[in-house]
Image (cartoon, rainbow, N blue to C red):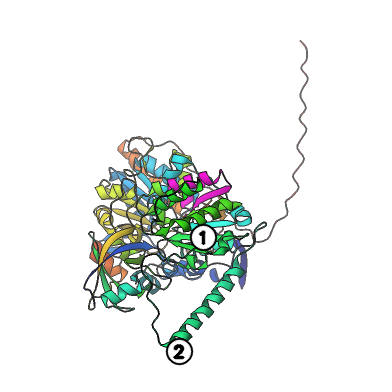
Amino acid sequence: MSKVINNVVCPICGCLCDDIEVTIENNEIVKMKNGCAQCEAKMVHGYKSEERILKPMIRKDGKLVPVPMDEAIKKAAQILTDAKYPLLFGWSSTVNEAQRIGVELAEELGSALDNCASVCHGPSVMATQEVGIPAATLGQIRHRADLIVYWAANPWTSHPRHVERYTAFTEGRFEGSQWKSYMQKMTAGASRKKMELASKRISRVKPPIRPAVCFTGPPPQTLQKPGRKMIVVDVRKTMTAEAADYFLQIEPNRDYEVFEALRCLVQDQELDVEKVAGIPVDYLKDVADAMMNCDFGVIYFGLGMTQSLGRFRNIEIAIALARDLNRKTKFIISPMRGHFNVTGANQVFAWQTGYPYAIDFTQGYPQFNPGENTAVDILKRGDNDATLIISSDPAAHFPNVVMQNMMKHPLITINPDMNAISRLGDVVFPTQWCGIEYAGTAYRMDAVPITLKKVVEAPPGVLTDEELLTRILAEVRAIKTKRGDPVGQTEITPVKHKKTVTKSKRCKPTAKPKKVTRKKKVAA
Amino acid sequence: MVERKLRVTLITGRTIEQGVGKERGKGSIEYYESCAVCYFDKSDMIKLGIKNGSTVRVTSTYGSVVVRAQRYQWGEMPGMIFIPCGSWANVVCGDDTHSMGMPLFKGFPVEVEPAPNEPILTLDELLMKQFGRNSL
């Protein structure tokens, strides 16, 4: 018998789309509606694939051997307590309740604690700390934004429903969808290509080779039209750029210069150069005009800015442009956060320790120093002597030169499936898929907390991240107590989530509060 | 004239195929086919004398990896190649964080050359070669 669950939250990217409809048969998701290609890959196929880990494993003689859960937990706790400077990294694809326990574990161990933001939007967090950020929720953008700029971001591949749900192609309350004009543009483009091919066949003359200097054409008239417009700035043309009204192809590593040039133009200054990062200044003037003349503009920036030269200075200057534009109109700037709860990792770490990432507990209190306490820098120096990786895959997303240092010491991994890092682990834990097999809280890219749903039962014996970390922490404390080391006093009580409610329940009327009458004081 | 080696700028990043592959599972054929690939501009492919599906070797100061060449269909990007995020791209990425925690994943120089008889390693083979262990 099949069951349909509505409004399921997709636990993949920072969009956290909450309109997914899944069909369940025999405790398995068999069908998914409304989601993107990635959502289908995970929720229908990936979560139950052959790569799933069902039992904890320990590496013995170079091979991973299944062991009982208690043995694996004891082994992991022993590795962590024996280490002088363990590194706890990941946290971006798990729920806030588990991240909270993670901070406590890091404090107990006196370890380094870092999340995926350090190789993602860490520079954006640093820039925000420096100069602040004019932000808005995705709902505001959906209903009001009439100019959307994607800078060094390609949401069509990394956040496939961002354009459709929140920006150019959505029907907002005050701004319409741009979908029809895009379809017309695509049809016209296809017809033009057909005509060109036909004329080429008839004339048999080779078309002139365009000089490889500037791939950006002049801005179209539509850039100054009323209604929604989309501009894409990137080093290469992408699918998102294809859908945009205007695409600026800039030279790699020169985002900072383009932002500075736009700031000058917004402030009515003249530039004494002809081109900036390969773009003629006249084109940039039209872009600056479009930015100043909009009613509500937004810049969404991606990893093209944080991972290229300049890093957090690129973001700082982008925020400065948004600040300048706010003197003329309303302008917002926001990072395109990648993993579904990397924003939550920053929020929980900041709430618990005061700092969003790159935290060090060696002194007994949290210290924040990006460039020193960040995972890649710790591994590059070879400082740590044990590593715990949870809900992330640095073997697929860290440079191999630093990963080789990680491999010199014991590695504990906590992931639901056999990803690249789990293949390398010494102690490999299975865990449940959050958002599919257990509920929890995650923060969307605009820092709005959303509750993930449980839709199917987990395989027997597989714990949640929160339960597993709680048991490891208890074991660490037991080992430390045996040794006579001081341990934390806090008692951990795992958060209990309500079961998924498919039908709305009527609220029972509450009992009337009893009247409290004060006793009159009797005069003595 | 066909050149033996080409010095280009490497950009790593996301593709929708890589996104689908990683959600299907890191050991899946979808992940392998979408990540062990290098996108070229048409003009650079002519310079190197390679076609869609040819194997190429990408080398940086940090390492060297063999991937499959593919023409970039969305636009022109001469002098630039694109490898999707994943274990293959990581072999050539550097560890210089500029004191900010973020290694250079985009916009750094690499050399690329045709590698007609060299195999493209699977994830387990690559992990074994790089770190001396895997899940097998």
Residue on which disc 2 sits: A202
**Residue situated in front as seen by the camera: A499 or A238:** A238
Mark number for residue B101?
Answer: none
Q: Nearer the viewer, mark 2 or mark 1?
A: 2
Q: Is residue A335 magenta?
A: yes
Residue A289 belongs to magenta span = no
- Density class for disc 1 (Cα within 10 Å; few <14, some 14-19, many ≥20) is many
Where B88 falls versus B70 (above or below)?
above
- Residue at position x 51%, y 78% in the image: A192
Q: Which quadrant holds residue B71?
A: bottom left
Disc 2 to disc 1: CB gap under 8 Å: no
Q: Name the residue beneath numbered marker 1.
A: A231
- Give SS at disc 2: helix
Which residue is at a point 39% across and 52% down the rendered structure image? A273
Of pointers 2 and 1, the one earlier in the residue sequence: 2
Q: Classify A444 as above or below B81.
A: above
The segment highlighted magenta reads A315-343
Amino acid type indicated by mark 1: Ile
Q: Nearer the viewer, residue A86 or A366?
A: A366
Q: In the image, what residue type sits under mark 2?
A: Ile
**In the displayed structure, would residue B89 be above or below residue A507?**
below
Element at label 1: strand
Check the image and report above or below for A360 versus A35: above
